[in-house]
Image (cartoon, rainbow, N blue to C red):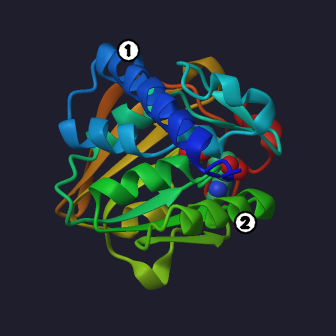
Amino acid sequence: MPLAKPDATSSAENRELSQLRALMVERYVAGRGVKDPRVLEAMRQIPRHRFVPQVVRAKAYGEGALPIGSGQTISQPWIVGRMIELLELTGKEKVLEVGTGTGYQACVLSKVAAKVFSIERINELALRAVELVRELKLHNVSVKVFDGTYGWSDQAPFDRIIVAATAPELPEPLVQQLGRGGTLVIPLGRGENQRLARVRRIGTGVQIEDCGPASFVPLIGRFGWKDEEKGK
Ligand code: SAH
């Protein structure tokens, strides 16, 4: 008797997942105003369900943020798309991400930028993210464990910087590591009062643009919140 093809179910399952993903992008990302076609396509490609814990996997293609362990969350698909869109990437840029979390956003970025350097302060999260980056064969993503408020000085300057946790004020090292004409997208403030800011380096100063409300976990570190409770 012929053996069942080991990947027969999984390819059907993959088709179904990719349909769910397309729906997620259409409803919860494009449907909420994200327009950049490259960002939408990248989000159709990256298998978000593989980044979330098994217990919440059924919700991977919903619209919400989800718990990822260590008290952290993977952001709503909409805000991931929105923040990346705000970076106005052409595909040639070197990007720094602070707050790797599951690695999902870093992997989406890898499809729309040239190189992605991502920093996470929690070792277990970073390890799992590195594993996924490898499994997905994304060769332009590097992850390290460190306090990302210091930036990644030996890779600076960056064309773009994206911070996935909310800060009390602009972390000075990140502004310093932004190249000429570069853009930094970062949530500022705490709890319910967070705002998404887009910062551009103009000459010796910075120009800050308010891009609407945000809801992130706190950025903990030397140039962030000094202790976890304060940023909540
Ligand atoms: N982009 C992630 C979600 C990020 S949640 C994803 O796609 O899954 C925010 C992350 O920022 C958390 O994992 C938290 O541990 C991390 N973080 C907080 N402060 C940090 C710091 N100073 N340096 C690096 N990572 C930090």
Dot 2: element: helix
Image x and y of residue 143, in percent? 58, 70
Reading the chain from its start, which is encountered first: label 2 or label 1?
A: 1
Q: Which mark's residue is nearer the viewer, 2 or 1?
A: 1
Q: Amino acid at mark 1?
A: Arg
Query: Disc 2 and disc 1: Cα gap in Å?
Result: 32 Å
> What residue sits 69% from the left and 62% below the top?
126
Is residue 30 positioned above or below 54 on the image?
above
Give x and y (percent) for residue 11. Answer: 52, 42
Q: Is residue 167 visible?
A: no
Q: Residue at x 61, y 18 (%)?
A: 192
Q: Which residue is mark 2?
A: 127
In depth, the one of 80 and 9 nearer the eye is 9
- Residue 136 locus on image (x, y percent): 51, 61
Q: Is mark 2 within 8 Å of ligand 1?
A: no
Residue wearing tag 1: 27
Residue at image coords 38%, 53%: 109
